[in-house]
Amino acid sequence: MSLLRQLLLSVTLAMICILAGTLAFSIGSARGYLNEQLSAQGENAAATLALVLSQSTNQDPVTRELIMMALFDTAQFSEVRFSDTDGKVIFERKLGQDGESASAAPDWFNHLLPLTTGAAQRGVADGWTQVGVVSLTPHDGYAREALWRSSVRILVLVLVAGAAWALFAVWMIRWLKRALVKEVMNPVQSVGMDDTLEERQAPPVMAELASVSQAIHAMRERVRTTAQEQHAQIEQLQLELHTDAVTGLATRRYFVNELRRLLQLGGTVDESVQQDVTGHALVFRLRDLAAINQQMTRVQTDEWLRSVAQALAVQVRENGVKGAILARLNGSDLALLLPGVSALEANRQAQRLLQVLTRLRVTLDSGRQCRWSLALTDYVQGEDVAAVMGRLDQALMRAENAGHGEIEYLSGQDQGGGPSTGEGHWRQLLETALSRDQLLLSLQRWCDEPASGAVADVVRCEATLGLLTQQNEVLSAYMFMPAAVRVGLSAECDLRALALALSWLEVDGRELVLKVSLASLAQADFRERAMALLARHERSARNLFIELDAFALSAQGQRDYGVDVQQFCAGLAQAGVRFGLRRLTQQLDALRYLDSLALAYVKLGSDFVDDLPHHVGAQAILGAIMQTMIAMQAQAVADGSVTAEAAEQLREAGVRIVTLQSEAETVSALPA
């Protein structure tokens, strides 16, 4: 129990005792006074009646009886009695015998506080001779009623006084609490805080608290000085904890914590950004850090990484994105957090940073420049941090697999709920699929898109590698091949796809297109193993088309992968394999090397086809491509949805427009 409550309780008990004593003494005094009044009334009335009855004119018994009856009828006496000298009762009257009413006071009150009304006696004489004794007992009904009313009034007064004291006590407690809060608690709570509370110059509410207020004020000043010193030390420690020692950028922990905070609270979203999108995250991965460490000393590598980080930081500041955070996640990964920007703006920022990275590339001992892979994703408020980081990891896998050095963008909506797990899980999943023959080929038909309402002709089929999970779900190569490249199993997957394709061609006479990863071409034994498979299926190899990314023929692709694509294609062409190229319009420098391939077709990108009706430059590029195709007796193919205007220009240029139609057939297991 608090001190205030103890004080209030003690004072309240004292007040109750005082009021109860006052009530008891007041009622007792009134009761004593009434007893004395009744006794005096009886004595006076008895003396008067005896004197009247002693008159010589009143010696007649009838007259005496009339006088005593008249006195009794006044209702002031409860008993009137006259007896002779021998004690014989000559006249007697009592209340209750003739139906007189009782007192108005309740019975419990009469029993609790009884009035003592004794009988008053006087002698009656006839001359000098005593003839009898008159006895009068006063009636106490009126006295009891008066005592009852007086007691009620005193009790009401005591209760009113008690209630007033209770209200005063409650008000006093609240006032004391407010005074303590204002004079003690608030100043104490403000100790150690910044100067958010103004210094109070007014005197305290209670003079007793003046010394306490002065002591608290002095303590606040001492604590404030100490807190400022500790705050400076903490800031220095946090700076060291959240700053990478080599690059001076934020650490992974700081980056993840800031990302988590934005996901929980939401970022400041531009008007151009959708309401549910709160920003984007970008990751740069230096793929050749191990090679750089081998040819440069540690100090030189750290200096180069520091220069890259400083250049990126300068570019980020110049970009002017509010709240952008540049961090180093690990040895080879840098990350940039872009809160509150749209996808278009995030891509612009990433392109500017990519230019900085390209400018600062170092040349390796192999003669090629170091490679960067860039991944970009969005994040929404309420999303889990692991999901965002998983998408970045997935996009990095795709960027490494593509090898083109461009930014790989993976949106949370585009991912479609696909797995975004780490390398360990992917390695186990892929090794299990290879050992249990869980890889399969999904087939799609290339159908000519007719110019009119004619029936489309089937040109050839295209195979897409898939992985059958334990839940009987098929993951497309789009999902797991980036992981296969990361864990070094892309060649095994592509060789398994090649074997499945050749087994299908043994029983089906149609032509088949198979995509091969550029990372697989860089494997030392991939060409020999592929040639061995083709040697066992000579007849089937003539209907096989290997489709490559045009980046493999570009100068950058040659430097990045260090593989002679022309030599590889020449070796497979001896077995009758023909080749196709995709994304040629994005790698125009590959046109110089087309004549060295057994090229059957090239695919035009959908973006290029969409721009064709509106850009003269795209039309000129198409003309150059078609001249090369005519010279090589190859085809240019456009697949997917094509507008009528673009389709007309494509047909005029000689481009073959095809649509992809899925077949129910899948190739899942190699023949025994």
Image (cartoon, rainbow, N blue to C red):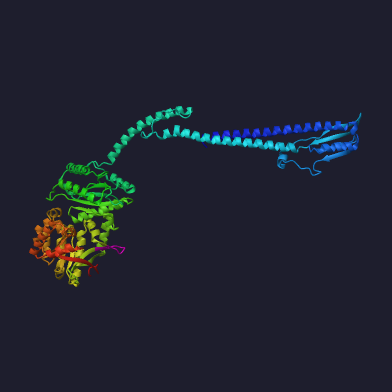
Kindly tell me whether residue 579 is visible in this rendering. Answer: no
Q: Is residue 521 above or below residue 185?
A: below
Q: Which residues are magenta?
A: 466-474
Quarter of the image for the C terminus: give it: bottom left
Question: Which residue is painted at 31% across and 34% down in the image?
Answer: 232
Answer with the quarter of the image where residue 498 lies: bottom left
Answer with the quarter of the image where residue 110 lies: top right
Q: Is residue 561 magenta?
A: no
Q: Is residue 316 above or below residue 463?
A: above
Nearest the viewer among 537 and 303 is 303
Q: Is residue 242 left or right of residue 170?
A: left
The picture places residue 97, in percent across and down from the top left corner, at: 81, 43
Question: Which residue is painted at 68% across and 36% down in the image?
Answer: 151
Question: Which residue is painted at 17% across and 62% down in the image?
Answer: 645
Q: Is residue 2 left or right of residue 564?
A: right
Q: Residue furthest left?
A: 631
The picture places residue 326, in percent across and down from the top left corner, at: 24, 44
Nearest the viewer among 244 and 448 is 448
Q: Is residue 539 above or below residue 557?
A: below
Answer with the quarter of the image where residue 239 lies: top left
Total marks shown come to 0
Nearest the viewer among 264 and 368 is 264
The picture places residue 501, in percent across and down from the top left corner, at: 19, 67
Kindly tell me whether residue 375 is visible in this rendering. Answer: yes
Q: Residue furthest front?
A: 57
Q: Is residue 467 magenta?
A: yes
Q: Is residue 41 above or below residue 343?
A: above
Nearest the viewer among 535 and 368 is 368
